[in-house]
Image (cartoon, rainbow, N blue to C red):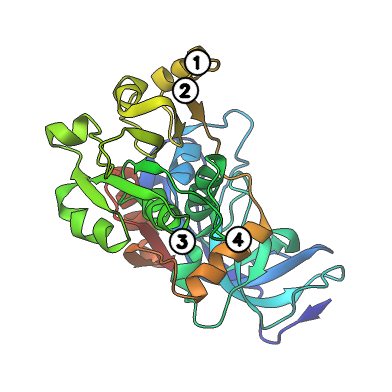
């Protein structure tokens, strides 16, 4: 088992010990640095990102089975490997990496985390820890949504008329960029204060979601046609609003479905126009590498809403729960 010298016996971490209570339940503790198993690496964490799933778990999404308390939240981390298990072959001490931890196990809001080699990838030179830490859940979710509608990134795709809702959020900012890289014509909805940002990410047309046009998900195709696909990242948008905006065989992919849209998905399963639910992230290391390569090449950017030191993790948590972050919320160690 290889290790870097100077790894301490204890570390700072943030954890909670029960369901609910939000940011106020986060406690700063000093606990032993985790030991690594055969196929794990020990990462000295430089940055972690907060995702809605983190505080949704705290609210009890997986109760009564998970999480196991006390629980250290956050699953998207970037840092440097300081120790590797005896069965690790692709990674080595000193590698700068990005890791997508299992979100129900967490561990990211700490100075060190033990991570499976299978979920850890070397990040390209020049990609900062903060930019990398924003990628796993949000970036992979956006990528999966685009792949599910047949998007090609090798230049062989024909392109389609695509709408991305809540385009200034964590998933939305990546979805707009990936849709443009896939050759699509992109319309995006967001708040008025973020319209210039979303245009800068490549959206062809940006609509304020608070206007009548935004509420109606108005089409903006150069030919006046309706959308071929809608990538919905807004929990407040119902199928009843999406359906009229779609072409006759159009499809909506819902990343943050509400109960009404779950019902709609079942009812439209065999319809010409349909809505499909998409669970969080089922892509892996190869897709994570693909996204990091795009970031390293300057073709994909992480939009950072705010940066918070570990001692102010509760501020980051509360900001995420507020639901109006522009891009990703980062906690730095």
Of circles 2 and 3, the one toward us is 2
First in sequence, mark 2 or 3: give its number. Answer: 3
Considering every residue shown, the one lying at the far left of the view is 211
Q: Local crowd at mark 4 within 10 Å, few (<14), some, or many (≥20)? A: many
Q: Residue at x 64, y 31 (%)?
A: 65
Label 2 sits on a secondary structure element that is strand
First in sequence, mark 1 or 3: give its number. Answer: 3
- Give the distance between the C-alpha atoms of the residues marked 2 and 3, in whole angstroms: 30 Å
Check whether the beta carbons of the residues at disc 3 and disc 4 lie within 8 A of each other. no
| Placement of 30 over or under 165, stated as above or below | below
Label 4 sits on a secondary structure element that is helix
Rendered location of residue 276, percent (x, y): 51, 28
Residue 274's disc is: 2
Residue 48's disc is: none
Label 3 sits on a secondary structure element that is loop
On the image, numbered disc 4 is attached to which residue?
Answer: 288
Q: Local crowd at mark 1 within 10 Å, few (<14), some, or many (≥20)? A: few
Check whether the beta carbons of the residues at disc 2 and disc 1 lie within 8 A of each other. yes
On the image, numbered disc 3 is attached to which residue?
Answer: 134
On the image, numbered disc 1 is attached to which residue?
Answer: 271
The answer to whether residue 268 is left or right of residue 166 is right
Of circles 3 and 4, the one toward us is 4
Check whether the beta carbons of the residues at disc 1 and disc 3 lie within 8 A of each other. no
Rendered location of residue 171, percent (x, y): 42, 49
């Amino acid at each position: 088992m290889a290790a870097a010298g100077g790894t301490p016996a204890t570390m700072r971490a943030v954890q909670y010990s029960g369901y609910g209570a939000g940011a106020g339940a986060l406690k700063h503790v000093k606990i032993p640095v985790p030991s690594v198993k055969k196929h794990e690496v020990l990462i000295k964490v430089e940055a972690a990102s907060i995702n809605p799933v983190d505080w949704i778990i705290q609210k009890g999404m997986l109760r009564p089975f998970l999480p196991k308390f006390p629980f250290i939240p956050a699953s998207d981390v970037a840092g440097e490997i300081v120790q590797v298990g005896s069965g690790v072959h692709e990674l080595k001490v000193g590698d700068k990496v990005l890791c997508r931890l299992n979100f129900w196990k967490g561990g990211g809001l700490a100075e060190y985390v033990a991570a499976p080699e299978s979920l850890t990838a070397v990040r390209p030179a020049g990609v900062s820890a903060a930019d990398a830490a924003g990628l796993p859940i949000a970036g992979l979710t956006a990528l999966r949504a685009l792949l599910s509608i047949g998007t090609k990134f090798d230049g062989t795709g024909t392109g389609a008329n695509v709408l991305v809702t809540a385009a200034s959020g964590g998933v939305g900012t990546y979805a707009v960029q990936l849709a443009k890289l896939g050759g699509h014509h992109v319309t995006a909805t967001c708040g008025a204060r973020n319209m210039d940002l979303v245009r800068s990410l490549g959206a062809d047309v940006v609509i304020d979601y608070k206007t009548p046009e935004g509420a109606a998900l108005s089409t903006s195709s150069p030919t006046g046609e309706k959308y071929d696909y809608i990538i919905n990242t807004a929990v407040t948008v119902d199928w009843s609003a999406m359906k009229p905006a779609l072409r006759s065989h159009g499809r909506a992919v819902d990343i943050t479905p509400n109960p009404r849209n779950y019902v709609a998905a079942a009812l439209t399963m065999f319809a010409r126009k349909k809505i499909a639910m998409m669970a969080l992230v089922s892509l892996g290391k190869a897709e994570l590498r693909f996204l990091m390569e795009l970031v390293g090449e300057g073709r994909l950017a992480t939009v950072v809403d705010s940066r918070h030191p570990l001692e102010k993790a509760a501020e980051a948590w509360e900001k995420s729960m507020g639901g109006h972050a522009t891009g990703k919320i980062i906690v730095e160690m």
